Image (cartoon, coloured by chain):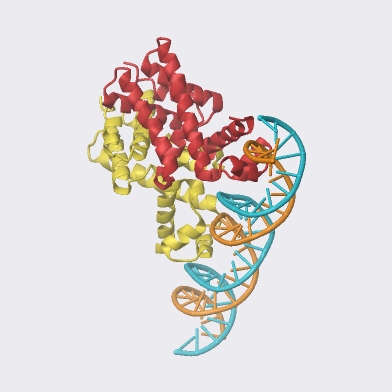
Chain colours: A yellow, B red, C orange, D cyan
Amino acid sequence: MTDTVSAILDAAEERIRGAGYHGFSFRDIASDVGVKASSVHYHFPAKEKLAAAVARRYTDRFVEAVDAEVAQGADVVEAWRHVFRTALQRDGRMCLCGALAATSHELAEEIRVEVKRFFELGIEKLQEGGLDRASAVRVLSALEGAMLTANILDDQSIFETGSSALVA
Amino acid sequence: MTDTVSAILDAAEERIRGAGYHGFSFRDIASDVGVKASSVHYHFPAKEKLAAAVARRYTDRFVEAVDAEVAQGADVVEAWRHVFRTALQRDGRMCLCGALAATSHELAEEIRVEVKRFFELGIEKLQEGGLDRASAVRVLSALEGAMLTANILDDQSIFETGSSALVA
DNA sequence: ATTTGACTATCTAACGTTAGATAGATGGCT
DNA sequence: AGCCATCTATCTAACGTTAGATAGTCAAAT
C-alpha cells in the first residue's frame, strides 16, 4: 500500500467519523491528501469502494488491537473497552462503524457488509473470551452507546460512566 | 401546524433516520410530500432549520410518550426502554437523535443544540425517576447502543438482549 | 385587500465520475 | 548498453446531474 492510498484512507476515515458517509466528497479527500479528485478515483473507482475499504481497515486494526491486549493477559471486556476509549480519546470522534451503522438503512450493500462484520466479529470475539452471547451483545452495544453519548455531550468522561457497569 | 408542514417533518425525520443529515435533499422531501422543493423552502428556509425542527419535535414527542407511561405508573427505566423499542419496531430505523449524534462532529450548531437536548433531557428525566446520574447515563447509552446494534445487524431481538440488563 | 402557500423558473456551486494526456519507473528484447 | 512497450500515478478538463437557495407569479383563504 502506497503512502497516497493510506493517506486517502486516513482522510476518509476521519471524514466519515465526523460527518457520515454522505458527509464527504472526493474533493474533500483530495484536498486533505494534497492530490486531485481524479487521483482518488484512480485508487478507489467509486465512493462505495472507498468507504468499504475504510471500514475493512478500521475493523482489522480494531480487532488486532484488542487481540494484542488479550494476548498480553487483559480481560476481554476491558480490552474492548480500552480500545474503544482510545479511539474516542485519540480522535475525539465516533467509532467509524458506529457512525456508519447509525445510517445503515440506506447504506450500500458493499459497505453494510463491512460494518456488519465489525459488530459480528466483536460479538464473536467476546464470546471466545468466555461471555455468553447475550453478554457479548450487551457489552458491544453499551460501548457503542457510551461512545455516541460522550460524543454528542462533548464529554469524554461520559464514556467512562456509560461503560462502567460492564466489568462483572 | 398545517398538514404540509407536518408531512415535511415526517418525511425529513424518516430520511434522516435512514441516511443522516447529509443523506437527504429538499427534492427528496418534496417528492415524498408531493410538493415542489421551493415549497419546502417556504416553510423551512434552510436545511439546518428543517433538521433542527425535526429534532425538536422528535424529542418533544419522545419525552411526552415517556412521561405518559410514567404517569400511568410504569417504572422510569422500563418506560424509556419501551418508547425506544416502539421507535425501533414501528419504523425499523435508528433513533433520530442517535443518528444525528453519530455525526455530531460536523453538525451545525443549531442542530447539535437540539440533539444535545434529547440526551440531556433523557438523563434529567431518568434522574427525576430516582436514578443517580451515572445510572441515568448508563441507561440512555445502553438504549442508544442497543438500537444501533439492532439496526446494523437487522435483528430487533438484539435490542431486547442489548438492553436487558438495565432493570435492576 | 392582504396574507398564505403553493407554483415556475432559475441561479451558482458542488457532486461523482470519466476521458485524455503526461511524466516517470520498470523490465524484457536486441 | 540502448530501445521500446507497458505500467503507475498523477494531472487538467469536462461530463451530466443534483445540491441548496432565491425571485417572481398566482390563486385561494382570511
Instruction: Look at the picture and state if B22 lies above or below B84.
Output: below
Left or right: residue B23 compared with residue A126: right
Residue B125 in sight: yes
- Relative image position of residue A81 (x, y in whole percent): 29, 36
Quarter of the N terminus of chain B within the rendering: top right
Left or right: residue C2 compared with residue C26: right
Q: Quadrant of residue D4?
A: bottom right
Residue B140 in sight: no
Q: Residue at x 34, y 22 (%)?
A: B126
Quarter of the C terminus of chain B within the rendering: top left
| Residue at the far top in the pictured view | B73
- Relative image position of residue B125 (x, y in whole percent): 35, 22
Nearer to me, A14 or A149:
A149
Instruction: Look at the picture and state if B140 lies above or below B73.
Output: below
Instruction: Look at the picture and state if A37 lies above or below D23.
Output: below
Q: Quadrant of residue A78?
A: top left
- Relative image position of residue A18 (x, y in whole percent): 41, 47
Query: Looking at the image, how many numbered discs can be counted on the residues?
Result: 0
Nearer to me, B128 or A17:
B128
Nearer to me, C20 or D8:
C20
Instruction: Look at the picture and state if B100 lies above or below C24.
Output: above
Q: Quadrant of residue D12?
A: bottom right
Q: Residue at x 39, y 28 (%)?
A: A137
| Residue at the far left in the pictured view | A73
Q: Residue at x 46, y 25 (%)?
A: B62
- Relative image position of residue A156 (x, y in whole percent): 28, 39
